[in-house]
Amino acid sequence: MGLANCPECGKLYVENTSGLCPACYEVEEYEELKIVEFLREQGKASIEEICKATGVREKTILRMMKRGRFKGTFDITYPCESCGANISEGRLCPACSKNITDQVKESNERRQEQDRDGVRIYTKSFFKK
Ligand SMILES: [Zn+2]
Ligand SMILES: [Zn+2]
């Protein structure tokens, strides 16, 4: 535990599990209650809908979600960072994260092929001598 700057108001505070200074945490707890109330009525909502209905900022809602606040109790969706589809976990929808995994795999395979070619050329010229 050390000192940190509160990400909300910038004041120095003693680090705690909430990641906020006590004053901001109090505000956030109040905002969380508003969200919970809204979600109880709606059952399921996107972050955008929650922002509009409660006035709580998207950044704050995301932080609460990262702390696992609504996990398992409520279904909150937010847009995939790549295509904008509604998701409730991670940063990308399953289709986009699969795309990225495929791309990474492909470039890895290509690199391995290049390595093999490199070795072959090296071996050939080595034996010529
Ligand atoms: Zn603060
Ligand atoms: Zn996507």
Image (tube, helix red, strand yellow):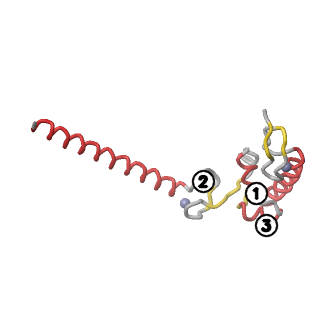
Measuring from the top left, give residue 80's x and y in whole percent.
59, 59
Amino acid found under the numbered disc labelled 3: Lys
Q: Is residue 55 left or right of residue 109?
A: right
Q: CA distance from mark 2 to mark 3?
A: 22 Å
The residue indicated by pointer 3 is: 52
Report which residue position mark 2 lands on.
91
Of callouts 2 and 1, the N-terminal one: 1
Residue 93, above or below 49? above
Residue closest to the far bottom: 52
Query: Of all residues shown, which one is farthest toward the top?
Result: 1
Kind of residue indicated by mark 1? Gly
| Dot placed on the residue nearer the N-terminal end, 2 or 3 | 3
- Asked whether disc 3 touches disc 1, contact meaning CB atoms under 8 Å apart, the reply is no
Q: Secondary structure at mark 3?
A: helix
Q: Position of residue 25 (x, y in %)?
A: 85, 47
For label 3, being within 8 Å of ligand 2 is answered no
Q: Quadrant of the C terminus?
A: top left
Foreground pick, 104 / 79: 104
Residue located 53% across and 54% down the image = 94
Per the image, the residue denoted by label 1 is 43
